[in-house]
């Protein structure tokens, strides 16, 4: 053990002094502080980017950035995104190739990572609008889309082609939405079709009053907002405002129909018929100078008849008549409202030295109505018209006078069977008519001085014969309805030939 010298004793005695003790304490404190700083204030680490990449979005629309960062106090992604959480995803649809940079920072510094994204190629809606249809009815949607795998239009249309048109007629204002899709996403466009409330025509008036003339009825109407106005039956297209004189022969309901692009409306007016009007009925000498001619003109009738011996006729016409005695003809016009009559008298003056005409008996059934042909003076039979089948349906005599005019006697019987015409030559006359009968006349065999002609069927249980030796048959008599029920003849001595 070394012995202390005087210097060592001085040194040792210093540390035992107050200044020495204080100095030692200070040294210990400084050493502790230095050790604390060394232990508690190590240099921090910079952030760690564990993931930053880009994959197609699960929806198939755009791309998805994914990232995860550890130890950062702030994370940003640029361009166009900004601050984000330490971990997350972001759907992006850049229009061009874009490199996204993720920056993670803390006190120790910052670190970067990049991810490159190819641009999405969304469809392009080049046109989608609504305009009037070319037909002028409804409206037409038009569209043109490129780059789409599917195009739809709603409501009520669904899938369509990339380019096209569609006629639409919605009942109310409608906004149509076109959606174009591909693998990168979808885009929309809208077109609004404004529908004005439908404005069909308005029938302001449609009625019927008695015509001011007292003849017939007058329809009156007034319509607004129509492109076409019609009145039926029997009138057709008319102006929007007007009147029309009508004379229906039966109760008639007239219907006025007004139309435009928004629809049509109807109105009716019922018209009771007036009595028929007999505008003319008279008897004048025939234009040929032989016999007389009845002339008539009737309006508003459903049936017109002239009696005796004529029956149903048209509303307007003429008829040659040659009665053997003074005759009053009665024209009767009928419709639903009733009937009216008019008469025309034909006065027949007795002729001197009139040839005596005799009548045979009548053979056949008891049905039908009786008839007897008038034989015009100085005439001969030039034609016999027969309608027949299994029976004689109808017979009619045609005369030719010395002056040349043709006079037709009324037809007797119905309109069934087949019409046959038996013409007689000049100088030819009928000597005899024979045949068979039952309820009707079954057959006729006409025998002239030159030939024989047969008509009708093969039935009949009874035989008849008209005429006599040396006689000329000049007319017929009998009974008829739908058939020739019974037959007789008028005859005289044969002419000198």
Image (cartoon, rainbow, N blue to C red):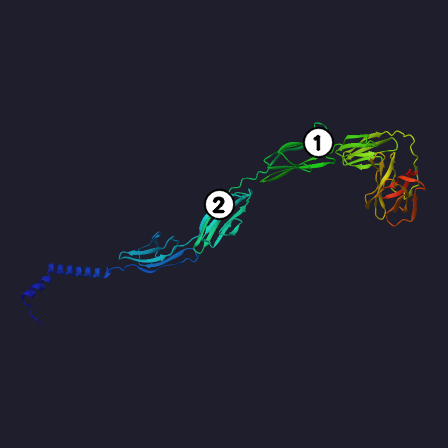
Residue 374 visible? The answer is no
Q: Residue furthest bottom?
A: 1
Q: Position of residue 90 (x, y in %)?
A: 38, 55
Q: Position of residue 362 (x, y in %)?
A: 92, 41
Q: Quadrant of residue 486?
A: top right
Residue placed at 21% from the left, 59% from the top?
37
Q: Nearer the viewer, residue 242 or 311?
A: 311
Q: Mark on residue 217?
A: 1
**Residue 65 appears left or right of 488:** left
**Residue 227 appears left or right of 80:** right
In the rendered view of the protein, which quadrant contains the C terminus? top right
Q: Mark on residue 29?
A: none
Q: Is residue 297 above or below residue 365?
A: above
Q: Quadrant of residue 398?
A: top right
Q: Residue furthest right?
A: 469
**Residue 77 appears left or right of 277:** left
- Mark 2 element type: strand
Q: Nearer the viewer, residue 301 or 149?
A: 301
Q: Is residue 460 above or below residue 222?
A: below
């Amino acid at each position: 053990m070394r012995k202390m010298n005087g210097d060592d004793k001085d040194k040792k005695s210093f540390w035992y002094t107050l200044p020495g003790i204080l100095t030692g304490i200070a040294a210990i404190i400084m050493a502790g502080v230095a050790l604390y700083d060394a232990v508690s204030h190590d240099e921090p680490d910079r952030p760690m980017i564990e993931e930053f990449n880009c994959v197609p979005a699960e929806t198939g629309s755009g791309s998805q950035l994914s990232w995860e960062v550890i130890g950062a106090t702030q994370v940003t992604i640029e361009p166009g995104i900004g601050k984000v959480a330490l971990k997350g995803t972001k759907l992006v649809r850049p229009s061009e190739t874009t490199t996204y940079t993720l920056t993670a920072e803390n006190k120790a510094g910052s670190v970067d990572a990049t991810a490159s994204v190819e641009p999405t190629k969304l469809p392009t809606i080049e046109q989608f609008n609504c305009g009037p249809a070319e037909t002028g009815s409804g409206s037409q949607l038009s569209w043109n889309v490129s780059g789409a795998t599917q195009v739809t239009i709603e409501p009520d249309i669904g899938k369509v082609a990339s380019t096209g048109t569609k006629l639409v007629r919605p009942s109310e204002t409608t906004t149509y939405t076109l959606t174009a899709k591909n693998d990168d996403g979808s885009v929309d466009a809208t077109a609004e079709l404004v529908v004005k409330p439908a404005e069909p025509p308005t029938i302001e008036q449609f009625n019927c009053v008695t015509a001011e003339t007292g003849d017939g009825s007058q329809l009156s109407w007034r319509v607004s907002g129509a492109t076409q106005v019609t009145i039926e039956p029997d009138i057709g297209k008319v102006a929007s405002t007007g009147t029309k004189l009508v004379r229906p022969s039966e109760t008639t309901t007239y219907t006025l129909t007004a139309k435009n692009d928004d629809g049509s409306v109807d109105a009716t007016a019922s018209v009771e018929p007036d009595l028929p009007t007999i505008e003319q009925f008279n008897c004048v000498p025939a234009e040929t100078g032989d016999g007389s001619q009845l002339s008539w003109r009737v309006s508003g009738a459903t049936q017109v008849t002239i009696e005796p011996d004529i029956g149903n006729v048209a509303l307007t016409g003429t008829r040659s008549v040659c009665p053997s005695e003074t005759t009053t003809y009665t024209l009767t016009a009928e419709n639903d409202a009733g009937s009216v009559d008019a008469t025309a008298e034909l006065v027949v003056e007795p002729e001197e030295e009139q040839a005596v005409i005799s009548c045979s008996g009548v053979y056949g059934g008891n049905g039908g109505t009786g008839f007897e042909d008038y034989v015009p003076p100085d005439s001969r039979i030039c034609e016999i018209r027969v309608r027949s089948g299994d029976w004689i349906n109808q017979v009619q005599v045609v005369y030719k006078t010395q002056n040349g005019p043709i006079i037709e006697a009324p037809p007797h019987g119905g309109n069934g069977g087949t019409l046959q015409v038996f013409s007689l030559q000049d100088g030819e006359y009928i000597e005899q008519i024979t045949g068979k009968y039952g309820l009707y006349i079954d057959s006729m065999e006409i025998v002239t001085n030159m030939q024989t002609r047969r008509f009708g069927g093969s039935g009949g249980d009874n035989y008849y014969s008209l005429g006599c030796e040396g006689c000329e048959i000049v007319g017929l008599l009998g009974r008829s309805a739908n058939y020739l029920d019974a037959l007789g003849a008028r005859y005289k001595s044969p002419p000198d030939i």
